[in-house]
Structures are given as C-alpha cells and as structure tokens.
Image: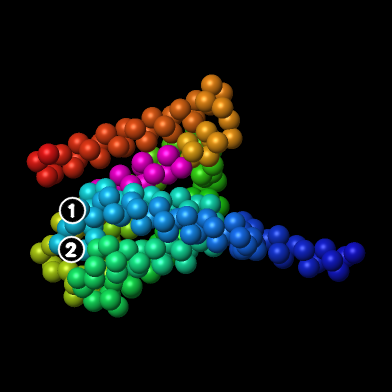
C-alpha cells in the first residue's frame, strides 16, 4: 500500500502544472475547437494590419490563447500551431518564415509563463471571477500586454523584419490590440462558463460584472477602431 501511494503522489503533483496527465478525447477536442475559433477570429480582424505583420488594434486571438492556457498549459502546442497556421494562411507570410515562427514561439512561451503566474501564484480562476480575481485581472492586463508587445515586436526587429523607426509604433499597436483582446475575451470566457452552469436568473454579481467588462471592452474597441481609421 505504501508503494502504491509513493507512485500516486508524484502523478498528483503534476496536476497544478496544468493537468498534463489528462490527455484524451476531450483534450484533442478542445484543442481542435480552439484552432477553429482562433482561425475565425483572425478572419474578422485581419482587415487592418500594421506593416503587414499581423498586428491589429484588436487581437481577440491573444485573449483566447491566454484563456486556453489558463485552463491548462498543456494546450501550448495548439496555441503555437494556431498562430503559425494563421500566419501562413490568412495573413500570408510577408516576412521570413523562420522569424515568424520564432516570434510565435516566443509569444507562446510568454503566455505559458503568464498563465502559470496567474493560475498558480495569483490563484486566478478562469471559470469564476471573484472580487480578488477581478482586481488581479485589471492590474495584470497592462503588464501582460506590455510584455507580449515587446517580445513579439522585438523578435521581428532583431530578425530584420521591422525597421528601427517603426518599432515603437508597432509596439503601441500591438499593446492596444493585446490589451483589448484579453480584456474582452477572458471575461467573456468566464461568463460562458458561469452561464452554462447556472440559469440566467441565478447569475452571481461576478458573472454580471464579467459580462459588463466584456461589453465595455467591445465598446472601447469600437471607439479605438473608429478613431484610428476614421470610421
């Protein structure tokens, strides 16, 4: 009996790292659904790119990627594959394939680190916003968007695909897009989880608040796009 317990404990210790042992039909189905939604979101947002680098003023795919990794970091390969697939198909490769893959890999690693920090160090729960989660989320997003923007644009700059005079403009575009993507998609994901588990008339105040954040983010995104492109 002691021997059996000694074998079970190490497996259980892996679960906080993202449920790596739970690889099965549900895992692959979730990954496939993510790729499909990721692809659809990029079809909607790739109308306006900065310097043909796949940088837009609303990047819901970034929020979707972080939301999936908050569920489990084991989904990281799907996040990387989805990003590369979109670059090769929807956006088209207007730059070095090697640099593109390096940028997406660096961004995936950054999102895995951010998800691990949120989930395991800050006790953030993607399935239910508590008041501490809301405060953490609102303080975390600007820093996460800044890190993501510097990494993504920095790889393109170091790879010779982004000129020095456009670096900070690209970072600004990327920051706006990532921040708006996260602040709309992650609360929307949480609201979906909550709405599926309870009837509308029994929604908690936190569920209603996440819906409010989602609507506010969409309105803000629309205002930014209208001001930026004169629409």
Sort mark 1 into few (<14), some (14-19) or many (20+) by Cα contacts within 10 Å. some
Sort mark 2 into few (<14), some (14-19) or many (20+) by Cα contacts within 10 Å. some
Colour style of the rendered protein structure: rainbow
* Residue 30: x %, y % from top left: 52, 55
Answer whether residue 133 is visible to the viewer in this image.
no
Looking at the image, is 98 positioned above or below residue 122? below
Looking at the image, is 70 positioned above or below residue 8? above
Residue at the location (77% across, 63% down)? 8
Query: SS for tag 2?
Result: loop
Give the extent of the magenta segment: 175-189
- Count of all numbered marks drawn on residues in the image: 2
Residue named by callout 2: 52
- Please indicate whether residue 229 sits to the left or right of residue 62 in the image: left
* Residue 184: x %, y % from top left: 36, 41
Residue named by callout 1: 48
> Is residue 187 in the magenta section?
yes
Residue at the location (9% across, 41% down)? 230
Query: SS for tag 1?
Result: loop
Residue at the location (30% across, 55% down)? 42
Residue at the location (55% across, 36% down)? 196
Whole-angstrom CA distance, mark 1 to mark 2, is: 9 Å
């Amino acid at each position: 009996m002691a021997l059996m317990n000694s074998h079970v404990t190490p497996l259980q210790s892996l679960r906080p790292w993202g449920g790596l042992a739970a690889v099965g039909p549900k895992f692959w189905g979730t990954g496939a659904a993510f790729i499909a939604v990721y692809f659809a979101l990029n079809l909607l947002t790739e109308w306006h790119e900065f310097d043909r680098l796949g940088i837009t003023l609303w990047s819901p795919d970034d929020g979707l990627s972080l939301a999936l990794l908050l569920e489990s970091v084991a989904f990281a390969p799907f996040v990387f594959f989805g990003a590369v697939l979109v670059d090769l198909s929807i956006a088209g490769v207007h730059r070095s394939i090697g640099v593109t893959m390096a940028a997406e890999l660096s961004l995936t690693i950054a999102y895995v680190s951010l998800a691990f920090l949120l989930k395991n160090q800050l006790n953030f729960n993607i399935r239910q916003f508590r008041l501490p989660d809301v405060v953490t989320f609102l303080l975390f997003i600007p820093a996460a968007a800044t890190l993501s923007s510097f990494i993504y644009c920095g790889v393109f700059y170091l790879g010779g695909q982004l000129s020095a005079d456009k670096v900070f403009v690209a970072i600004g575009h990327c920051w706006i897009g990532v921040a708006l993507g996260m602040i709309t998609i992650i609360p929307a994901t949480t609201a979906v989880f909550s709405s599926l588990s309870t009837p509308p008339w029994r929604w908690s105040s936190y569920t209603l608040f996440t819906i409010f954040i989602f609507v506010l983010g969409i309105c803000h995104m629309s205002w930014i796009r209208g001001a930026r492109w004169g629409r």
